[in-house]
Amino acid sequence: MDYKFASRLGNLQASAIREIFKYASDPEVIFFAAGNPSVEAFPKDEIKNITNDILTQNPVKALQYGNSEGYISLRNSIKNVILNKEDIVKENDDIIIMSGAQQGIEISCKVLCNKEDIVVCENPSFVGSLNSFKSYGVNLLGITLEHDGICLEELEEALKNNKNIKMIYLIPNFQNPTGFTMSLEKRKAVLELAKKYNVMILEDNPYGDLRFKGNHIPSIKSMDTEGRVIYCGSFSKILSPGLRVGYIVADKDFLQKVVICKQCSDVHTSMLSQLICNEFLQRVDYQKHISKLQQIYKNKSDLMLRELNDKLSDKIEYSKPEGGLFIWCTLPDNIPMDDFCKKAVQEKKVAVVPGKAFLPQDNLSTQSFRINYSTPTDEEIIKGVSLLKELLEEYNI
């Protein structure tokens, strides 16, 4: 059969990360390529007990259709338990439950953007979001990501010279893939630029609660007084990615269109998953749970950074995140990044993600690759960094 595919698929490619997952079935491969939570982080017993109680006491609610906007008790719990530490939910805002934050990102683009509109994003940025934007025929415009956030001069130049920019997509906290965090000054400045040039901001914050060093920085949404910021949150990194529960906070007028699009997509998010998340927030000491996660990831990050410092500090550059799951490593200019990543997994059995997977435009290049410390065991972290050192030495570095 000669399939005639939709033209909008022409610029979409299989996720490089998912392609690397093919090597995950090899038990010898040390997997630095994932973005999965640590197995230590899952509150398995709590989820087991909560699920058993739900299916014993109220199975019909869990198994029946629900509202497209999401389970009202969960929406209230998110506001009161997760978002209460800063003024994220404004007077004219609401919270809508999504089937993972990815759906919130994808539908936000669907609501706002026409074909050939421009979405401005950090360079590099999260590949899942980039593909979502591309699927609607928008053009991506990557702005250099500095250690303290997006380059303000480049951003204003882009906003000044492109009249069809609809949205600025940002991951301010422990960014994927770099681990960088946007400073408070830049958050304020980006919001002012969005006001000046009348564009929306999509603030993606899946890692914000996973800060294990430094001080909390207020979200861009908390500073928004015009309904200009769409805030995406998720249970994937704080509870379980398999539940597929996320949420967006935005102005009610915007969310009316989001609900219509969600009804076209999946009608509603799984009721069982929503009930589990709600009961978890009601029963479990949330801050104590978050503190446990922060300690897990601090220990893993500290270990990987120690190994990088001891074995590779004279060979590569790397970020030193204050939270989240990722470290961004940059090779010397004389080492071909793609070749290095290929040899790492095929010859040394260490899977890393080539940085080109995170580039928003085809004409961009990078010498960097992403590694993850949440998924591998401590023993794998130590061995994996040693194997990367061996590979670099083969390049006479």
Image (spheres, grey):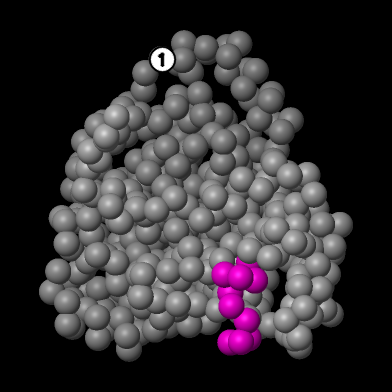
**Residue at 84%, 80% in the rendered image:** 310
Q: Is residue 106 left or right of residue 253?
A: right
For disc 1, the neighbor class at 10 Å (few under 14, some 14 to 19, many from 20) is few
Where's residue 327, x and y in %?
64, 69
Q: Quadrant of the C terminus?
A: bottom right
Indicate whether 25 appears above or below 376.
above
Residue position for label 1: 64
The stretch drawn in magenta includes residue 133: no
Q: Nearer the viewer, residue 127 or 90?
A: 127
**Residue at 17%, 82% in the rendered image:** 161
Q: Amino acid at mark 1?
A: Gln
Q: Nearer the viewer, residue 314 or 167?
A: 314
Q: Is residue 365 left or right of residue 40?
A: left
Where's residue 322, x and y in %?
64, 71
Residue range in magenta is 332-341
**Residue 10 appears anywhere in the view:** yes
**Residue 76 appears anywhere in the view:** no
Q: Is residue 100 left or right of residue 6?
A: right
**Residue at 39%, 39% in the rendered image:** 98
- Outermost residue on the left side: it is 163
Where's residue 24, x and y in %?
68, 46
Residue 369, by quadrant, is: bottom right
Indicate whether 55 appears above or below 292.
above
SS state under label 1? loop
Residue 393, by quadrant, is: bottom right
Indicate whether 147 appears above or below 126.
below
Q: Is residue 101 left or right of residue 120?
A: right
Residue 376, by quadrant, is: bottom right
**Residue at 53%, 44% in the rendered image:** 235
Q: Nearer the viewer, residue 154 or 137?
A: 137
Where's residue 331, x and y in %?
63, 81
